[in-house]
Structures are given as structure tokens and as C-alpha cells.
Image: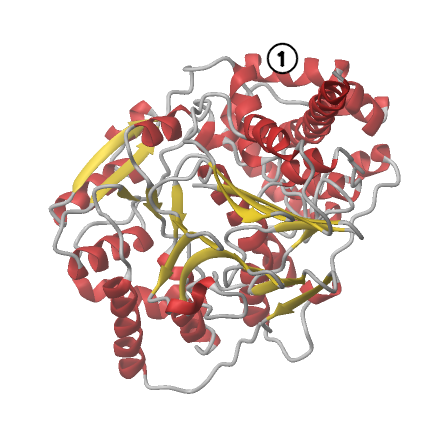
Amino acid sequence: MSKFVIICTKGTIPEVHKKKIALIEKLILPNNLSPNPSQHIGDHSLSISIINPNNTLKVNDKAVCLGQMIKPKHDWQKPLGDIPTDGNFTILRFDKDLLEIVGDRVGYRTIWYYCNDNIFIASSSQRAIIAYLEKFTPNDQVYKWMLSSGTIGPDLSWDKNITKCKPDSTITLDRKKWKISIHTQPFNITPSTFNIESAQQKFYNILSNIFQNIQLNNNSWSLPLSGGYDSRALLYFLKKESDSSINTITWGTKDSINNLKSDAYIAKQVAKHFHAKNQFLEINTEAEYTHSVLQRFLVASEGRIDKISGYVDGMNLWNKLFQSGVNGIIRGDQALGCHTVKSKNEVYHDAGLTTFEKFANTRKIDNLLGDYQQIVPNYLEQQSTESLQSWCERLYQTYRIPTVISALNEIKLNFVEVISPYFSKSILDFIRQLPDEHRSNKKLFISIINQLNIDIPLASENSHLNKKVWLRKPKVLNEITEYLFYSHSANHIFPKEYLNYVVENIEEKQPSTFQKSMRKIKNEMLKTGKPIDINNILFRSYIIAKMNDLIKEDLKQMKNLSIKSEFSKTL
């Protein structure tokens, strides 16, 4: 649940540092959250600040672990020491010579950093780095990625000078030589032949071993339960390996609990099957003013993602969990196998790596936007030795998880700790050895779960308010369009013709089933990609403009603080 900020300087940390960190804490947390007191460790030239820590945090005077390690060795606290095989974590550790930051296997917890000749800053927050430096260099490469994919794109930050750490990487700063080295483990999918029965047993044993060694206080951890395979498997293994009861939670709109096909309804049946408690938490879509909903979403997500449907209550659900003493949640995010894909276009869409040309209706928008670039890095393209399916798997693990799933994870980390046992190294290593035909569609994993005799159907409808529906509400459209027309950033970033076109073409009603069918037929006849929702374009334009304005406001407050601090020295 904690955010971290590391400051390391060549000389002594400036006197204004503590005031800066205190202000950053207020800036980067949602305004409905009353955080726990921050914790700080360090020395004369290094400071590690943990913002909103809870009892899950492992910390001593020279090391911090955010998240959960499974069976760590004693020297995990020392630079160049042990890196636990399993778990989801970020490790921060230092001595007088070295500072080391250890990331997780799939980039589930994002690490951002900046370094020049005098200062090194790393954080789980881009805004924290920008605010501390009091300098913002907007990165316009983000804009097209946000508009076409709803993310800030591969390896990008809102600021050109901030670098995103790649998955399975370690950053080491030699404090004396002032030199950074980064070690990234190579990603390999190495399919091997195997017997299906023995593979099932081996995988079952790996899963059991993970859950035997997770050390959680079940009273302060909750399992979000849906109607799918992944969360019911988590509940099975947690119950199997634990003597205490497991608290499960499910959230959704008020009506979803009575929908026999929904996640909310099916989850309750799954919990009953395992004799587990299940608490339903309502996402009240009318609980907050639209302005508050949007503001808190952007602060919590830092504008990295547009998937707002689970947060349209203004983050009230997550604040209630925090206030009720829930320290962490156990999620079923996974990389157990992608859907079967038949074309490159399917791979791009499954991974969320969607550029403008992947859609049927973006040519006009693209022309109106101007010269903003959108580049897919070479390492994300299909390699000559890769099958389509293995490429899809690699994109999922090296792009979608650290870009999309990590961004969603960071929203929750404002309030609670988050772990996903399926991202443990031993599970990922095993999955990467499976042949395509047994890895795709999670085939091997599902074959194991189907043998557990959980005779409850899978949910076919989620319990959230559909984002398309929310983005057609008049009060939402009014808030967004008004902001875009009056925001200085919006008018600086987007040509007037672009904004007029988007606003003139927004839809206030959901397309009928007939309209959807006709659009699909038309796209197939023209052999074009599926169209992008123009209301999504509107919302994503808002995210771009609003994040630029939020960051500029951060800088104003930080500069005022610095001016006051300098003035106080003269008194």
C-alpha cells in the first residue's frame, strides 16, 4: 500500500528536504485518504521515505521491502544480497557504498528514476520525482499512446527525463563513483516436451508450495473473489494451506449481486462452497460529484490508465477497506497463458499495444492531431524465432503487465498492499516452459482447477458499471468537455479543430444491438480494424490535459515552499 521516494545526493541532503517530502505526501495521495504517518530511514546524503505504510512493511535502519517476499534469506537486507525467488516486492537497501533497488519479476510494482551529476531520485510515483526536482519536461510521445490505447505507452513517463525500470531488473548506484548500473534478467520462453499427467502434478505441487510459504495475517488480508477460474483457485489453495478462515470480498454495482451471471453473484456461491466469508461492497456510482471522481482517479492512477469503471465511486470503496483495517488484498492477476491468437492484429489488441492505425475510424483524428509521434519499440515486435502464440505471451508479460496491470495495481496501492501469488518466479518459470498448445487459454492451469470439483459455473458478466455507459452520462460529458475547452494545457496540446471534431462526434446514448451489428459487418467488408469509441478519445484527451495541469500545479506549490524556506533563512 505504501509509496516510496528515495533521494540520494553527492553532498548533504538540503534542509528543505523534509518539508518537500511532507508536501509531496499531500500532493500524490487521493484527498479522501487520511494516511498513516510516513516512515523514514537513511543517512546524511540518502533518504528513503515510505508514504502511508502499514503493518505489512518490512523495514530496518538500512532496508525496506514493500510487498511480500516468500522464504527470504537473512541477507535480503544487504546490497548485492539475496533476491527472494518468489513473491511480489520492491526491495530498497543501502550501505555507505551502494544503494540498490530490486524490482519484481514482471514489473507489477513500477519503479521510476532520475539521475544527474548531483542527485539520484527513485520512486513509485512520477509526480513525486517531478515535484522534488521542481522541473517538468512534458513528454509528447505519451499523447498518442494515451489516445489510442488508454495507457502512457511502452516505457514512457509523463516527463521526458524520467526513466521507467524494466521488469526483473536491479538498479545499483555506486555512491562513491556516482555510477548507475542496471541488470535486467533476459526474458525467455523455452517450450519443452512433457507428459501431460506429470506436468499437471508438477504444476499443482508448485502452486501448493507457494501457498504453503506465504506468510499472511488472514485477519488483515482479503481475497477479492470474482466468478472466474483464477480467484477460486486462489481460495482453494489458501484454504488448503491455512488453518484460519479467509476473508473474501466482491464489489460491484447494487444490482449486480442479483444478476445470476455476474461476478458478484457467482463469487458468493464460490465463497459458500469453501465455507468462506464473503462481503459485497457496492460501487455507488452516484456517491460523489463527477469532478471529485475524476480528480481522485487521476491522482491515484497518475494518469497512467483510462480504466475508471471500478473507481467511479470516487475511491470510496478503497478508502472503506483502508479504514476498516484491511492491510492488503490477494489478487488473481496472472500470466498463466494468453488467449489463442490467429493474427498479428489480435496479438496487439490482446496486449493493449494498439496504435492509431489499428482502428477503423482514427484517420481523421490522426490528421487533426498534428505531428505527435507514436513508436513501437523494436523489442516488442515479433522475433523471427517466435511463434505467434509465444510472441503474444512475451508481449503480455513484458508490456501489458508492467504497463496496464501495474497501472491498475498502483491505484489500489494508495490504500492497501497488493500481492499476486501467480507472479511468483517458480510459477512463471514453469509456464514459460510449456508448449504453446498447453499454455494458450490457460489450458494446463484450467485442467487442474477442473479436477477440484468446484461445481459452480463461471461468471459471464462483470459487476462494474460499463465505462461506455458512464462516459455517456450528461454530467460526465459536461465536466470533461467544459474542462477541455477552458484548460490552458488542453488548448496548448490539442489543435482547436481536433477538440471541436471530438466534441461534435461524442455519443450520448449507447448504440443499439442493431447498430453494433451493422458496424461490425461494415468493418469486416472494408477489412478494417474495429472502431475506437469517440467518447474514449474525449476522456483520454481529458486525462492528458488534466495530468499536465496537475503536474504544473505541483510545481507551483513546491516552488512556493522553496521560496518560503529561503526567506525563513534570512529572518
Residue indicated by mark 1: 478
Q: Is residue 320 left or right of residue 525?
A: left
Confirm whether residue 494 shows in the render: no
Q: Residue at x 63, y 40 (%)?
A: 150
Q: Position of residue 100 (x, y in %)?
A: 58, 61
In the image shown, does 312 or 261 lie closer to the viewer? 312
Residue 357 pos. (x, y %): 75, 48
Question: Which amino acid type corresponds to the residue marked 1 in the rendered image?
Answer: Asn
Position of 411 with respect to 73 (left or right) is right
In the image, residue 50 sits, relative to residue 430, either above or below, namely: above
Q: Decide which of 523, 70 is in the foreground and name it.
A: 70
- Counting from the top left corner in percent of width and height, residue 295 is at 57, 22
Of all residues shown, which one is farthest toward the right?
371
Residue 464, percent from left and from top: 40, 32
Q: Residue furthest front?
A: 571
What is the number of callouts on the image?
A: 1
Q: Residue at x 45, y 78 (%)?
A: 433
The kind of secondary structure element at disc 1 is helix
